[in-house]
Image: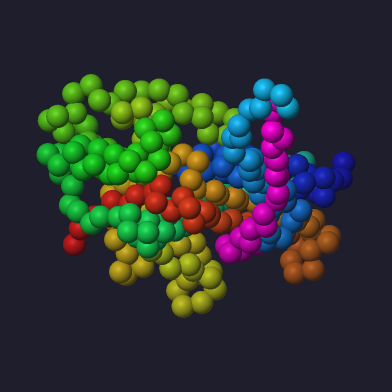
Amino acid sequence: MAVNTIEYAKLMMNKLDQHAVIGLTSGWMEANAGQVIYNGGDEVKIPEMSTAGLADYNRDTGFVPGGITVKYNTYKMTQDRGRTFQLDSMDVDESGFVATTTNVIKTFQEDEVIPEIDAYRYSKLATIAKAANQSEEINLTADNILSKLREHIRAIQDLVGSDKRLVITMPSTILGLLEDSPKIGKSINVADFKQGQLNFKVKFIDDNPIIVAPSARLKTKYDVLDGLTGGQEKGGLKASQDAKDINYLIAVEKAPIAISKTDKLRIFSPDTNQLADAWKIDYRKYHDLWVKKQKEKQIFACIKGA
């Protein structure tokens, strides 16, 4: 029975986007985009709502009318990435095509796409924080990490108040230092943190969740590899020679706006593929991250010292 590759590709595109949000350690940032309008390509429309402020109540005329404005701002995604794969027809019969293709794309997304998107987002947040004078370079130890982390948390809370939840991202090595702090006591507890459609158990400090990300994704700068030339055949991202390690990032939960969209997933059968007697899979992903100008101070980057 022939495989309907067009309908299968459409179904997989939605599943891949859901899979990415769950797999990304930075997936929580995508909730800040709201009900995004995406019709393909490198542009998304993100809603923004504003209202009028309070007015005096008049006992004769009652309430003063107020305006509500809802507009969609257009954002352009700068990260346009993709790959093509071929599965020889002798290795994949038609009955096993769906399972094999699913495994290829799932493995590719987990091993390559998700780490790249995470790394790009964290490095961009660190760049934004540094430009906003919201960063510090320091070598952390078990003795100084707790006081330094709370100092940075309070610096943001002094701007936004203590009622807004902050998300702290750090590698397991820094979390280990925090847990080894002689003053930590019972400051760390475990609670639910929602990302996408799932709830995860994560550690919290002072009611703020700690997201653990691999240290390879927490660098200040990356080279984007084109996957073609100069030893870049593997593609992906590579930490720049002048990159520094990120100890941790702190962000008001609603500050970063992130989007990742599978724009194209095309599947060609061996009879359609003009290049080889093989199934051909084309995968294209757009993604980016933004922080509005008025929220740049709501991020802090703690960078490892020289």
Residue 65 spot, x, y in % from top left: 72, 35
Q: Point out the image quarter for the C terminus.
A: bottom left
Name the foreground residue: 40 vs 72.
72
- Farthest residue to the front: give it: 60
Residue 29 in magenta stretch: no
Residue 42 image-quadrant placement: bottom right
The reply to whether residue 244 is in sight is yes
Q: Residue at x 41, y 44 (%)?
A: 251
Examine the structure image and report whether residue 82 is included in the region drawn in magenta.
Answer: yes
130 in relation to 148, above or below: below
Q: Is residue 248 above or below residue 290?
A: above
Residue 278 percent location from the top left of the image: 73, 59
Question: 295 or 109: which is nearer to us?
Answer: 295
**Left-right relation of 221 to 37:** left
**Which residue is at the far right?**
1
Answer with left or right where residue 211 lies relative to residue 79. Answer: left
- Residue 289, x across and y down, in percent: 53, 54
The residue at the point 35 percent across, 39 percent down is: 157
Q: Is residue 73 left or right of residue 118?
A: right
Q: Nearer the viewer, residue 12 or 135?
A: 135
Is residue 101 among the parts visible in the rendering?
Answer: no
Q: Magenta stretch: dominant SS? A: strand
Specify the segment rendered in magenta: 62-86
